[in-house]
Amino acid sequence: MKLRFAGAVLLSAAAYYVYLPLPRGVSEPWKLMLLDALFRGVMRAGDVAQALGACHQVHLLNRAVSWAEVIEARSTAAVDVSDGELGGVPARVFLSTGAREPKRGVVYFHGGGWALGTARMRSYDLLCRKMAGELDAVVISVDYRLAPEAVFPDQYHDALAAARAFLSEEVAERYGLDRERLCVSGDSSGGNLAAAVAQELGSDDTVTARFKAQALIYPVLQALDFHTPSYQQNRAVPILFRPVMARFWLLYLGADPSLEPALLANNHSAPAARSRLDWTALLPAERKKDFQPVVAETGSPGLLGRVPALLDARAAPLLAERDVLGKTPDAYVLTCEFDVLRDDGLMYAQRLREAGVRVSADHYEDGFHGCLSFADLPVLSAVGRRALDNYVRWLDRNL
């Protein structure tokens, strides 16, 4: 009887911890709750480890990722997989063994808030393996440096070095690449790097080849407004909560973590700064819903001076000048309704269109941040599977 009672108490406690009220319409809410419970547990363990001085929070998170997710490079009959480097940056190479010559190519940057993850994670290995096999292509997934050891612009410089190498004659000869059919892509913070790289190389007259396409998956593109409609609507929707995104920004920019409350209050976003981004004209009315703008009239004096990269388009590609955007390649932008970053992607797609870039947009009304990473077993997200299939289909038709 006592064992049954104890079991019931433990089961109830577990259910209480896992349960999280989610908005109506999100895909497979119980799967998302379980994922969130797992992530919250690891993040809280990281907080404790950092408070005790054992290690930085993200170090513990990355150790957990390595234990659960990192897999060896394993080739199959359809795709040859190996670990190497691209432009001096570690990378995993996925080379289709199909008959197409020369091959299309994708250089890919993984997500993780510029601080977590690796190209060797199971989810990214499966994603890139699928791209290489179904497109009969070469896909190179880049392991750029991570915060806190590396901060902006280190990650950007790694991504740029890898992308320049990917466009080079040497790499094209090594892997049999068609230099007129190359794409730069990434998800979340990797989408940020892909967008920044596309801007830099689109305006660089010294390059001898250019990307034909840029494919951005729920990218993070600005840090001037943490109260966009999607930040307000989805501030408590897993797996990316609003305070976590602010924390990642400060970590990436090498800024004092104590500035998090100021960012979340938009104290860095006084009218002078917001003039760089009039997003109200970029979002359709149906995405604003019950939005209430949060604008600090005076803000925190000197905050932008302490973190100048908040206004640097290499860190925040949404802020790029129109003529820079107009020189970037055809774009694919994937966004999810239940994602704090939804509006970043929607705004960027509209800015690209206004600059004359051809844009294809996929929006998932039941999608959540990171869903593409759960498109395969053992988690298997239905919306992630749809998103992955449509992403690869777009690449096939446009590359």
Image (cartoon, helix red, strand yellow):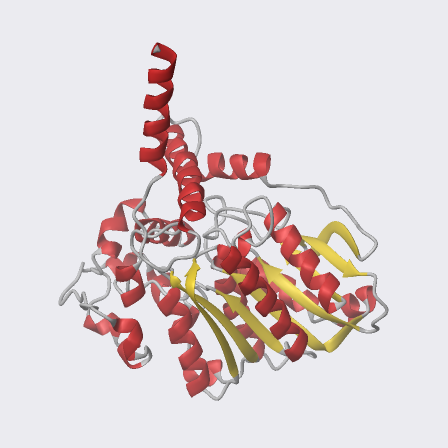
What percent of the width, then of the height, locates residue 393?
63, 72
Q: Residue at x 56, y 70 (%)?
A: 215
Q: Is residue 65 left or right of residue 122?
A: left
Q: Is residue 99 left or right of residue 150?
A: right
Most extreme residue toward the left is 297
Q: Nearer the viewer, residue 133 or 48?
A: 133
Q: Is residue 279 left or right of residue 195?
A: left
Quadrant location, the C terminus: bottom right
Q: Residue at x 65, y 68 (%)?
A: 164
Q: Height in image: 127 above or below 274?
A: above
Q: Residue at x 35, y 34 (%)?
A: 15
Q: Nearer the viewer, residue 41 or 377?
A: 377
Q: Quadrant of residue 43?
A: top left
Most extreme residue toward the top is 2
Quadrant location, the N terminus: top left
Q: Height in image: 130 above or below 211?
A: above
What percent of the width, then of the height, locates residue 70?
62, 41
Q: Quadrant of residue 290?
A: bottom left
What percent of the width, then of the height, locates residue 169?
77, 72
Most extreme residue toward the right is 99
Q: Residue at x 58, y 66 (%)?
A: 185
Most extreme residue toward the front is 1
> Is residue 280 visible in this depiction of the protein?
yes
> Is residue 277 visible in this depiction of the protein?
no
What percent of the width, then of the height, locates residue 12?
33, 28
Q: Nearer the viewer, residue 179 or 79?
A: 79
